[in-house]
Image (tube, coloured by chain):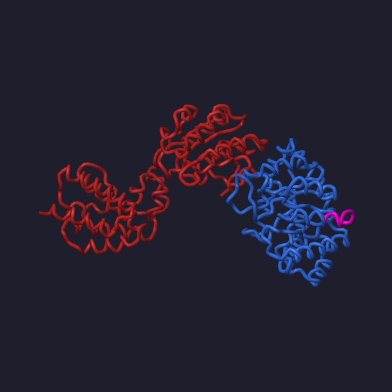
Amino acid sequence: MARLIDSIFGHEQIWSRLTSLAAANRLPHALAFTGPPGVGKRMLAWALAQWLVCARAVQGRPCGQCPQCQRVALRQSESVFAVEPQGHAIKIEAAHDIVRFLSLQQIGLARVVIIDQGQLLNPYAANALLKIVEEPPSATHFIFIVPEISQLLPTLRSRLQVVRFRPLPIEVLRQKDDIPDWMLLSARGSFENLEAFYDSESGELRQTVLGFLVSAFRGERAGLNQMLEVGKNKEAALKGLLLLQQLLRDWALLDSGEILHTDARAELSKMPKWDERAKSELMRYSLQMESDLMGNVDRSLIFENFFYRVCPQLG
Amino acid sequence: MSWIDVHTHLNMLEGSPDEVLNQASLAGIERVITIGTCPDDLPVVLRLARQRFPQVACTLGVHPHEAALYSEEVGQFIRSEALSREVVAIGETGLDYYYENSPRDVQIDAFRAQMQIAADLRLPVEIHTRDAESDTMQILREFKGSVTGLLHCFTGTQALADVGLECGFHISISGVVTFKNAQSLREVVKRIPLDRLHIETDAPFLAPVPLRGQKNQPAFLVHTARVVADLKDVSLEQLEKATQANAQALFPKLF
């Protein structure tokens, strides 16, 4: 689809505000798109770039048909310069590339520089950009994409107008009827998170993890054995642990808050009631499991230890 | 805008030729010259050009990497097919001592043989040269007055550029000029006369900044054009007009 805004769900107010400002020639030349990952900040940045370079934009929409629109959609446009981290940082070379790009002749109506994961700009790169962000050439726009504005250097952040993206509502995430509620709730407003769950194996994995948790509280090893099978694969183990953390959270909030795995309420209710301190200790331990899993700790030991940590409470 | 990509390899690109050409035309690339490199791909580039001329034209020749595959028979094939209107030049031929995929003496023989074909048919030649400046200059001088053409994807020294220009050759600049470490090439480009200058992609190789890492394609040509226009201190429109005129002068069969 050549008109990028058409494939973005939600954020209508942000889009309408930004394009109105742009139409009135009042769009700030440097923006920071902030908000949780996977809600559409990067896509909206590209859609806005398309609007800005489109020669035939009408009523807050780029035409999607002109060569400029099509080339932005293909990520080939000479009017858009996109920077992504190389490894774990955006280094000074990227800042120099941006300055060089802006020193060349402009083609079309506008130029847009999109800096994805701006929190990874190292201090040298951020400092090298200060002057050009402060006083960019005409018809030039910067869009920094960053989870939290506080993750940018104060000197850079003071030059940016912040546009806050919120998690998407469940109705927006529900693009297909067959997505279980627990997946939508677990996604926490992020298509990226939803995508991580929305596959044929996640439902089965969630049942395995729930079975492990329920049987651990009963002191039965059957669930543990299944969990150890999952643990043989690191990726599955990490996903399983995330589900385990969610289920622990639901167990802790069962009486007092909204839970994610609504369809598992009955089984969660059968689990023993612990006092608040013990519950939060167990939750904290599950976070420790995450760092152990990311490291080189034996994966079977991680789940086995959890099992024995839960078992003694039965008595 | 109306640009000509004077050196590309349509048959080596990932997308279908129609898709690639469609994207190129969105970027204002009006024509491309797709390059023959070895006996096996000559019929392929011929077919591509015959189906789409004048949007696509081709050259016929054997790349120095494949020089060992050059033979009398291949030479005869080139001679006969080069009479077609779609074949606008001989090549790519030349010398590559960097990779030395074929022995040097074999490369030199194949290069001379193809220069002779170009001389006999009065066609320009597209030359690839890398780490072989001395021998390249010698052969250009041997054919001075009877063969002109293009030093494609130029990355050589000022001395090679000077000899090429002295022998009537034009010089083509690829995406290499946009690379951070190509400062010496950028200095050479500043001194190439505007009436001998061309730009090319050499796709699928050498995608320009900022699209490095992607498979290059003719649609990326304008990224290189912007840098070359900056070095020549001309507007993009002036560069476009100059390169159009140069292509008309060097490849008359293209128009």
For the N terminus of chain B, the quadrant is: top right
The chain that appears blue in the image is B
Q: Position of residue B6 (x, y in %)?
A: 75, 52
Q: Position of residue A212 (x, y in %)?
A: 23, 58
Please tell me whether residue B201 belongs to the stretch shown in magenta.
no
Please tell me whether residue B142 belongs to the stretch shown in magenta.
yes
Q: Total number of numbered labels?
A: 0
Residue nearer the viewer, B153 or A64: B153
Q: Does A25 appear above or below A182?
A: above
**Is B137 displayed left or right of B100 in the figure?**
right
Q: Position of residue B137 (x, y in %)?
A: 80, 53
Instruction: Say which residue appears at 63% left-offset and 42% top-offset.
Output: A78
Chain A tint as drawn: red
Dividing the picture into quadrants, the one containing residue B128 is bottom right
Q: Farthest residue toward the bottom?
A: B73
**Is B1 displayed left or right of A265 in the figure?**
right
Q: Position of residue A96 (x, y in %)?
A: 58, 37
Instruction: Say which residue appears at 19% left-offset and 59% top-offset.
Output: A215
Magenta range is B139-147
**Is B101 displayed left or right of A259 in the figure?**
right
